[in-house]
Amino acid sequence: MAKKLIEISHVNKTYRDKTRGDTVALDDVSLDIFENEFVCVVGPSGCGKTTLLNIIAGLERFDSGSVSMNGAPVVGPGPDRGVIFQQYALFPWMTVKKNIEYGMKYKKVRRPAGEIDPKTNAPREKTEYTKLTKEEKRALSEKYIKMVNLQGFENAYPKQLSGGMKQRVAIARGYAVAPDVLLMDEPFGALDAQTRAQLQEDLLVTWQEEKKTCFFITHDVEEAVLLATKIVIMSARPGKVMEIVDVNLPYPRNQATKLLPEFVEMKNRIWNTVYQMYLEVRK
Ligand SMILES: Nc1ncnc2c1ncn2[C@@H]1O[C@H](COP(=O)(O)OP(=O)(O)OP(=O)(O)O)[C@@H](O)[C@H]1O
Ligand SMILES: [Mg+2]
């Protein structure tokens, strides 16, 4: 039985605005996320997807209910959660390598007693948690640059990269901090169809290798069915979890998976559900 990583229980969130009035963004939202799951969230615009992700990330407060991760309540951001935004959010003045290493700045790793301390060259007397060394950071950034196929661009600046390449840097940075879960808010939303297809496949390969839990928001139902082990369908006004669908298609998945009859059937069914809700919201 997989371990429960995140528990969202009866969460309510209303944005209060004196001039525009109140907006109920989340209404009694409950959701469990287990280790190694790839959870995709779909739903019409404004149904509270980003709000939910920001709450899990610890970037947004909520009014009632509870959110916990590894059994402890979420009270703010932390290195156990890596966030990848739609707009790559890279530092323009830093190279690819520096952008990836930046995320590791605050990361601490466990150094067991007895292990040689490189500073003193003697075994540690007790177990400690210390920051990564320069060499460790370099080794990790090299690993993840390779993972996202950006070898040769280590010293390039973001402005020298295409949109897809920038998003790869953001993904590498997300993985490099070794969080327990990657929270991704429409990370491929701004990309052309070919780059998006390529990054979907890269992400699937990485997910299968690293077995890192993913929480992934998308507008694109086809993308959700391709990636997810579990799809959360949200409805709008107020934002609620309407349905949770297990996607039992085998991995490895790739663009050819989209041709399977089971894939097409599931995609159409979920798409119709989301479209019906969209029509309801427009009324
Ligand atoms: N900071 C804010 N202040 C006031 N209202 C907000 C704020 N952020 C979001 N909202 C409102 O809360 C609701 C949910 O917004 P949210 O951004 O979570 O939706 P979403 O599902 O991510 O939409 P999209 O698919 O368009 O990104 C919307 O009605 C939005 O107008
Ligand atoms: Mg959003």
Image (cartoon, rainbow, N blue to C red):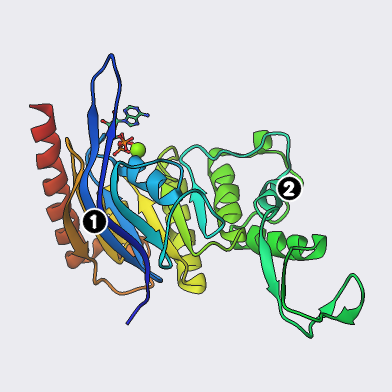
Taking the image as drawn, is residue 153 in sight? no
Residue 63 vs residue 69, the one in the foreground = 63
Judged from the image, the secondary structure of the residue bearing numbered disc 1 is strand
Query: What residue sits right under mark 1 in the picture?
Result: 30
Quarter of the image where ligand 1 sits: top left
Taking the spot 76% from the left edge, 80% from the top edge, the residue there is 126
Q: Position of residue 200 (x, y in %)?
A: 42, 56
Taking the spot 40% from the left edge, 71% from the top edge, the residue there is 35
Upstream in sequence: badge 1 or badge 2: 1
Image quadrant of residue 135?
Answer: bottom right
Q: Residues within 10 Å of mark 1 (few under 14, many from 20)?
A: some
Amino acid type at mark 1 = Ser
Question: Is the CB–ligand 2 distance for label 2 below 8 Å?
Answer: no
Pick the quarter of the image with the N terminus.
bottom left
Amino acid type at mark 2 = Lys
Taking the image as drawn, is residue 154 in sight? yes
Q: Residue furthest right?
A: 120
Instruction: Say whether marks 1 and 2 touch (CB < 8 Å).
Output: no
244 left or right of 142?
left
Tell me the tag on residue 98: 2
Residue 110 vs residue 82, the one in the foreground = 110
